[in-house]
Amino acid sequence: MKGEAFLIRYADDFVIGVAREDDGRRILEVLPKRMSKYGLTVHPEQTRLVRFHPAAAADSAAKDWNSTSPGTFDFLGFTHYWGRSLRGVWVVKRKTAKSRWKRTLQSLSDWCRQNLHQPIADQHQTLKQKLQGHYAYSGITGNFPSLQELLEGARKSGDVGYPGAAVMGKSPGPNFSVWRSVTVYQRHACPQPVEQRSAVIR
């Protein structure tokens, strides 16, 4: 290694940061060989070299040396990217990865359809726990828009936000939207997103 480097690992996922491109290419070349000695392999689609620094974020040219994502990477369910803080300083920001966001919304929608005939109070309690669990993990500083989009997307699906509306035996009519809003939404509203903890962003 000719420059500075660091490793961040969680279970079997890791990110290696290097100051020099040639060091990164060298690691990418030897890593599969080193892993194979222990009966391990690297994921061919998730292992890549990314130019990740503020200048790359400001540059409109291709950022990824392997011509994939432009200067961003996903790690532990978050997309990491460069952005300006409220003070105008370049910082690493995080938002829920698109694939994770879609899976979460689909999971909520599927659960609602499978439990339409459960009591409204029971549906509400479970959905509340599911959303709060997602907020607890994903509620880092700067990720509020992703949390809000998830809640809005779930509401638009017709399953979350108006839990149990489909089991009340009501047929859609002129007053259905009013009935649904007052009887279900206000009494069993889903929890609002909250940023639970702060990442190092100044």
Image (cartoon, rainbow, N blue to C red):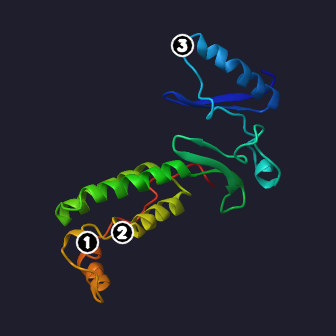
Please name the amino acid that badge 3 sits on. Gly
> As rendered, which of 115 and 78 lies closer to the eye?
115
Q: Label 3's element?
A: loop
Q: Residue at x 47, y 65 (%)?
A: 148
Give residue 133's position: percent from left, percent from top: 36, 51
**Label 3 Cα neighbours within 10 Å, binned few <14 / some 14-19 / many ≥20:** few
Q: CA distance from mark 1 to mark 2?
A: 9 Å
Is the residue under label 2 in contact with that under label 1 (CB below 8 Å)?
yes
Task: Give the residue pinned by disc 1.
Answer: 165
Please name the amino acid that badge 2 sits on. Gly
> As rendered, which of 104 and 145 lies closer to the eye?
104
Task: Give the residue pinned by disc 3.
Answer: 39
Please name the amino acid that badge 1 sits on. Ala
Give residue 171's position: percent from left, percent from top: 24, 80
Residue 86 in view: yes
> Would you say 45 lies left or right of 20 here?
left
| Callout in the foreground (3, 2) | 2
**Label 1 Cα neighbours within 10 Å, binned few <14 / some 14-19 / many ≥20:** many
> Would you say 34 lies left or right of 174 here?
right
Q: Is residue 148 above or below residue 171?
A: above
Q: Is residue 9 above or below residue 110?
A: above
> Would you say 159 lies left or right of 27 here?
left
In which quadrant of the rendered view does residue 162 lie? bottom left
Earlier residue among tags 1 and 3: 3
Task: Give the residue pinned by disc 2.
Answer: 158
Is the residue under label 3 in contact with that under label 1 (CB below 8 Å)?
no
Q: Label 1's element?
A: helix
Residue 131 in view: no
Earlier residue among tags 1 and 2: 2
